[in-house]
């Protein structure tokens, strides 16, 4: 995913990390459109009291108290704030996930005992000052899915949705969601966010298994969406 976006934005010769990232259909992620109907998944068992409670809190606070919503969900979902002051970005990440080192990655967090579920950040130079100079969220989504489909390991790739939100200081932040069926790990859900600041392209890619026989539960979905929406430029100090 990171390599797809980097290629779209015509970066310098710096080689980005190639992530294969995934995340579920968002319940809080408001999209402009759906390019392809999401695949049907088997019926899930009834929500647990915890999952139902989190969903109700999220829906209520999202409409009335967005700032309080973020604080409550981050605490209840056991998310920690991670800020890289040197590179200039910040995001929430699951407190139980492990930070690992990998060539080409600015930051990489993996679920304990399951490294295929991960959150990766890549920062690369770019000749743009904003994402809008390259194109709309839909234009970028089209380019991304085309690049994903060209990979030999990709059996199918479908864009679920995209959106634009304001970031720190009015930055344009694009968010994308799609699913990939690959020979490397099967079905995965991918959520990504990107923004440009100081002529650098910032990407976060969140990968999670989303196989038909074991789809993402609502609690994990909400947690990963919070990570996605938290990705932003680090506040100036």
Image (tube, helix red, strand yellow):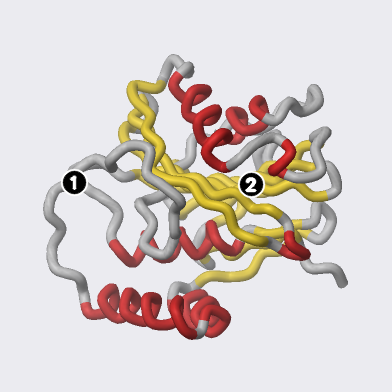
Mark 1, Cα crowd under 10 Å, few <14 / some 14-19 / many 20+, is few
Quick one: 177 or 30, which is closer to the camera? 30
Q: Which mark is residue 194?
A: 2
Q: Which mark is residue 41?
A: 1
- Say few, some or many: other residues with alpha carbon within 10 Å of mark 2 (under 14 / 14 to 19 / 20 or more): many
Under tag 1, what secondary structure? loop
| Residue 74, image x, y percentages | 51, 75
For the point 68% across and 61% down, which residue is it?
167
Image-quadrant location for residue 62: bottom left
Mark 2 or mark 1: whose residue is earlier in sequence: 1
Q: Is residue 55 visible?
A: yes
Q: Which part of the image, by quadrant, shows the C terminus? A: bottom right
Query: With 50 as the anchor, is 12 left or right in this view?
Result: right
Front-lying residue, 233 or 18: 233
Residue 78 percent coordinates (x, y): 48, 73
Residue 170, position as x, y percentages in the image: 74, 62
Q: Is residue 114 visible?
A: no
Q: Is residue 111 above or below residue 222?
A: above
Residue 128 image-quadrant placement:
top right
User: Label 2 vs label 1: CA separation?
Assistant: 28 Å
């Amino acid at each position: 995913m990171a390599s797809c976006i980097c290629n779209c934005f015509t970066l310098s010769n710096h080689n980005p990390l190639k992530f294969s990232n995934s995340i579920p259909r968002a319940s809080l992620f408001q999209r402009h459109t759906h390019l392809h109907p999401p695949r049907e998944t088997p019926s899930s068992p009834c929500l647990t009291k915890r999952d139902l409670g989190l969903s109700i809190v999220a829906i209520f606070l999202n409409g009335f108290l967005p700032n309080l919503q973020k604080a409550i969900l981050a605490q209840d979902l056991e998310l920690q704030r991670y800020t890289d002051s040197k590179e200039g970005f910040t995001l929430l990440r699951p407190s139980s996930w492990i930070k690992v080192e990998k060539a080409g990655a600015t930051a990489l967090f993996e679920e304990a005992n399951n490294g295929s579920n991960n959150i990766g950040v890549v920062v690369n130079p770019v000749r743009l000052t904003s994402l809008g100079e390259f194109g709309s969220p839909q234009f970028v989504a089209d380019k991304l899915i085309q690049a994903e489909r060209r990979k030999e390991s990709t059996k199918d790739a479908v864009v679920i949705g995209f959106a634009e939100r304001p970031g720190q200081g009015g930055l344009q932040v694009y968010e994308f969601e799609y699913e990939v069926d690959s020979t490397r790990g099967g079905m995965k859900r991918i959520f990504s966010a990107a923004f440009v600041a100081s002529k650098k392209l910032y990407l976060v890619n969140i990968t999670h298994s989303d196989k038909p026989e074991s789809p993402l539960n609502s609690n994990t979905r909400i947690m990963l969406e919070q990570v996605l929406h938290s990705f932003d430029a680090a506040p100036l100090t």
